[in-house]
Image (cartoon, rainbow, N blue to C red):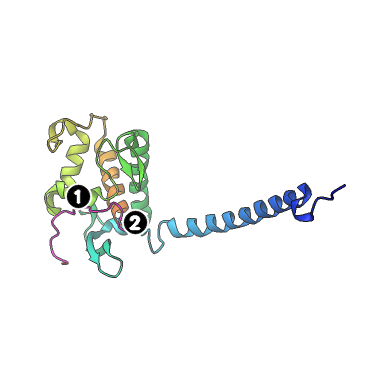
Amino acid sequence: MNKTPWWASESFWRKVAVWITGGMLVILIFLTFDTVKKITAGSSRVPAYSVINKRIYYRFNPERGFMEPVIGDDAPLFGKMLSEEEAEKLVSLGKMTIQAKNCMNCHTLLGNGAYYAPDLTKAWLDQGWGAESVRENMMVSFLMDPKTNGRGYGTMRRMPNLGITEEEAHGIVAFLKWMSSIDTNGFPNNFKTIPQEGDQ
């Protein structure tokens, strides 16, 4: 009777599977904590919420080979400097409103969502707003009344009126400004930014 070699036995491969699964679990836990540290607001790639008090623009980085966000001088949102707590509250309101209105049914945020409507990852820097000096008010007006203030750029696609209040619109604009400051390694690719005033 032939004896099964140790390396072909069922018990050996059962032990190998257990050890590999345990090892992968340890690696997964390590990567999870490492990732959370890197994506938390206030880290090197994800600025603190109070960044909405600063000017955010894009500049090409030749070493990395793509555009990256740059934090400039003071440029308080809606003309008011906010503390870190106030900024977090406003950005959180915007995030919660975007979730409550189910914006990702049509839009993409940081690579998640749908592709029916424009990607919102860098919407704050989008050239469609015309100029930096009028952008905030244009965004609020559009969010509150997209039928009157929307542009389809040659398509029949239009954003529906979601009943967004002025307070919610301010929160959404704050969230979009904060999100534009996140270093996304050049995503979305080939993004065309708003004409930038200074800091060139």
Q: Position of residue 29 (x, y in %)?
A: 58, 55
In the picture, the disc for residue 184 is: 2
Query: What is the magenta segment's predominant secondary structure?
Result: loop
Callout 1 environment at 10 Å: few (<14), some (14 to 19), or many (20+)?
Answer: many
Callout 2 environment at 10 Å: few (<14), some (14 to 19), or many (20+)?
Answer: some
The amino acid beneath tag 1 is Asp
Tag 2 near tag 1, CB within 8 Å: no
Q: Residue at x 23, y 50 (%)?
A: 124
Q: Is residue 171 above or below residue 7?
A: above
Q: Position of residue 22 (x, y in %)?
A: 67, 53
Q: Position of residue 165 (x, y in %)?
A: 26, 35
In the picture, the disc for residue 126 is: 1
Question: Alpha carbon of mark 2 to alpha carbon of mark 1: how far?
Answer: 16 Å
The amino acid beneath tag 2 is Thr
Q: Residue at x 53, y 57 (%)?
A: 31
Residue 185 shown in magenta? yes
Q: Residue 154 or 140: which is nearer the viewer?
A: 154
Q: Secondary structure at mark 1?
A: loop
Q: What range of the chain is rendered magenta? A: 184-199
Q: Secondary structure at mark 2?
A: loop
In the picture, the disc for residue 187 is: none
Q: Farthest bottom residue? A: 63
Q: First in sequence, mark 2 or 1: give its number.
A: 1
Q: Is residue 150 above or below residue 32?
A: above
Residue 176 shown in magenta? no
- The quadrant of the rendering that contains the C terminus is bottom left
Q: Residue 119 or 131: which is nearer the viewer?
A: 119
Q: Position of residue 78 (x, y in %)?
A: 21, 50
| Residue 189 falls left or right of residue 113 | left
Q: Residue at x 70, y 54 (%)?
A: 19
